């Protein structure tokens, strides 16, 4: 993997799943990582296995002042953030008729407002240092139609649009902004739905590479995007989904 030695990264949603894998992969590449989520104990466990003097900040990013407070605390602890990974998200699988204001507000607050406000708080430091890198963790749901996920899909589509807009705005300051769009990754997010009979096989059938994603599959691409190996890449949403977003499998599964 490319080296991130000497860089500092902030990873949201680092207490488990994809965010924890991203924190481990950035640390493996040599970066010092600040880990953010609500569960301080889980963050501490992930941080405990890292080598490069990690920092833990427990906070609710869904609170209006959460992102600004996180940025202040992280900058106070590590001095500068070179890489921001907006990974934390709330998710909901609900028919639209059962989608009320509380769900929509939470999804938009955590999945869209928090990445925007964290970016706003950290960009001045990146500009002052002549560059930086932002990676947003989006979803296949932002790219193709996923039933019973309208609010979640709307939040991820918004994040993809923000990724492109920010890449244009911040490129002249040397800041690259990209997104990764996971397909189906075996994390706590899927624990309930994975138990629905037939879902495991259906995911495999709808994935050309015929397997579920693992958190490390996403983390490796985040490290690539955060590194100088991706120095001319900005404004992209890169699918990391085994081909799922490109599938039109009319015959329904393995042949
Ligand atoms: N798993 C998949 O199949 C899949 C597919 C497509 C996209 N994604 C995206 O990948 C990212 C990571 O997903 P995952 O599967 O790793 O999910 P996960 O296991 O549910 O982890 C979500 C992370 O976000 C944190 N978080 C949630 N709400 C928060 C809040 N209000 N404030 C601070 N932190 C918060 C959680 O920590 P705390 O609970 O400790 O706060 C946790 O660390 C998300 O953006 C998700 O939309 C996942």
Image (cartoon, helix red, strand yellow):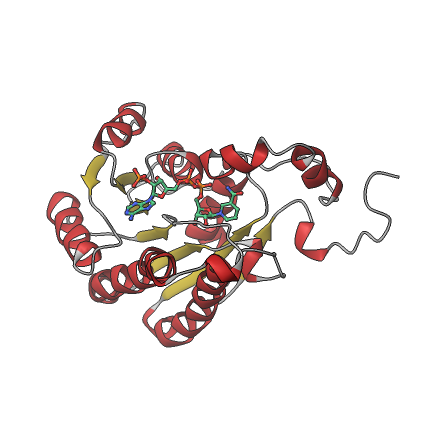
Say if 120 sits above or below 203 in the image: below
Say if 159 sits above or below 250 in the image: below
Relative depth, front residue between 120 and 96: 96
* Residue depicted at 66% across the width and 55% down the height: 245
- Name, please, the residue furthest toward the left: 76
In the figure, residue 56 lies in which quadrant? top left
Q: Quadrant of ligand 1?
A: top left
In this picture, residue 239 sits left or right of residue 53: right
* Residue depicted at 19% across the width and 54% down the height: 66
In this picture, residue 246 sits left or right of residue 13: right
In this picture, residue 8 sits left or right of residue 69: right
Q: Position of residue 19 (x, y in %)?
A: 39, 40
Q: Position of residue 99 (x, y in %)?
A: 44, 59
* Residue depicted at 73% across the width and 45% down the height: 206
Q: Position of residue 227 (x, y in %)?
A: 43, 49
Figure disc tally: 0
Say if 142 sits above or below 203 in the image: below
* Residue depicted at 13% across the width and 43% down the height: 77
Relative depth, front residue between 75 and 70: 70
Quarter of the image with the C terminus in it: top right
Determine if residue 231 is in view.
Answer: no
In the figure, residue 43 lies in which quadrant? top left
- Name, please, the residue furthest toward the front: 97
Determine if residue 2 is in view.
Answer: yes
Q: Position of residue 101 (x, y in %)?
A: 35, 63
Relative depth, front residue between 247 and 8: 247
In this picture, residue 17 sits left or right of residue 121: right
């Amino acid at each position: 993997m490319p080296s991130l030695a000497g860089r500092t990264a902030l990873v949201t949603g680092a207490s488990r799943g994809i965010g924890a894998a991203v924190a481990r992969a950035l640390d493996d590449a040599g970066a010092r990582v600040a880990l953010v989520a609500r569960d301080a104990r889980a963050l501490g466990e992930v941080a405990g296995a890292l080598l490069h003097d990690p920092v833990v900040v427990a906070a609710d990013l869904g609170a209006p002042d959460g992102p600004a407070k996180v940025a202040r605390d992280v900058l106070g602890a590590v001095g500068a953030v070179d890489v921001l990974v907006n990974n934390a998200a709330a998710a909901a699988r609900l028919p639209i008729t059962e989608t009320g204001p509380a769900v929509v507000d939470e999804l938009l607050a955590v999945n869209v407002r928090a990445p925007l406000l964290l970016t706003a708080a950290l960009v001045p430091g990146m500009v002052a240092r002549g560059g930086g890198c932002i990676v947003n963790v989006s979803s296949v749901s932002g790219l193709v139609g996923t039933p019973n996920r309208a609010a979640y899909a709307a939040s991820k589509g918004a994040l993809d649009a923000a990724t492109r807009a920010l890449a244009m705005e911040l490129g002249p300051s040397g800041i690259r902004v990209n997104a990764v769009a996971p397909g189906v990754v075996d994390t706590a997010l899927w624990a309930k739905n994975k138990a629905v009979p037939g879902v495991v096989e259906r995911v495999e059938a709808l994935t050309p590479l015929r397997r579920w994603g693992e958190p490390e599959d996403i983390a490796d691409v985040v490290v690539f995007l955060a590194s100088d190996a991706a120095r001319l890449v900005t404004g992209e949403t890169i699918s990391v989904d085994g081909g799922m977003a490109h599938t039109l499998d009319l015959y329904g599964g393995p042949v």
